[in-house]
Image (cartoon, rainbow, N blue to C red):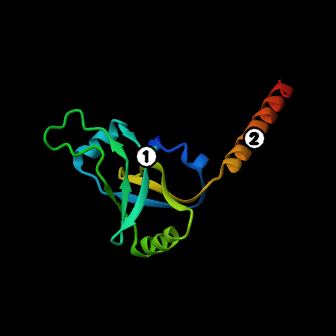
Amino acid sequence: MSSRKERKTIAKNRSARHEYFIEETYECGIELAGTEVRSLRERACQISDTFALIRGRECWLVGVHIHPYSHGTIFNRDPDRRRKLLLHRKEIDYLDRKLHDRGYALVPLELYFNEDGRVKLTLGLGRGKKLYDKREDMAKRDIQRDIDRALKARNR
C-alpha cells in the first residue's frame, strides 16, 4: 500500500483557457483563516469570474467566493473578501511589470490542496483572446472530436 499523498482539486476555472492565452503559470499560496480552510475541505468554493491584482507590492485575489463553514460561528469571515496571495518578491515585481503591458491579466486557474495539505492556487499570466481566436479554438476542438469518434468507430 502506497503512502504517497496526491493533490486534491478544490475548484477549476474552466473558462480561463477559453478567454485567455495562458503564457506562464505560477503556483502560489493563499492567506486563509481556519474556518475558510475547513470550508474548502468540504469543497465549497467558486473561482470563476475572479482575477488577481498587484497593489502596494502585494498580490491580491479578488472575487473568489468561499462559502461560510457549516459549523462555524462568529469566526466565519466574509465569503467575498480579498485574499492575499503568497509569491516571492521577484515574481511579484516581474508580474507587476508584465501587467503594465497592454492586454495582460492574472487569472486563477485552479485551487487545490497540495501533497502536504496546504491550499495552493495556480495563477496564470494570460493575454486576452479576440472573438476570432475563440472561434478558431472551438473549430479545432470540433475537428479533433470528429477525428476521435472516427478512430473509435474504426477500431471497434
- Quarter of the image with the C terminus in it: top right
Labelled disc at residue 3 = 1
Classify mark 2: helix, strand or loop. Answer: helix
Relative to 154, say whether 147 is above or below: below
Image position, residue 10 (x, y; %): 42, 42
Report the side of 110 relative to 61 (left or right). right
Image position, residue 142 (x, y; %): 75, 36
Classify mark 1: helix, strand or loop. Answer: loop
Query: Quarter of the image holding residue 31?
Result: bottom left
Q: Given the image, on which type of amino acid does mark 2 rest?
A: Ala
Residue closest to the eye, 48 or 111: 48
Residue shown at the point (54%, 42%) measured from the top left? 14
Distance between the Cα atoms at labels 2 and 1? 43 Å
Front: mark 2 or 1:
2
First of labels 2, 1 by sequence position = 1
Residue closest to the eye, 50 or 76: 50
Relative to 135, say whether 148 is above or below: above
Q: Given the image, on which type of amino acid does mark 1 rest?
A: Ser
Q: Which residue is mark 2?
A: 139
Task: Count residues near mark 1 (Cα–Cα under 10 Å), then give few for <14, some for 14-19, many for 20+.
Answer: few
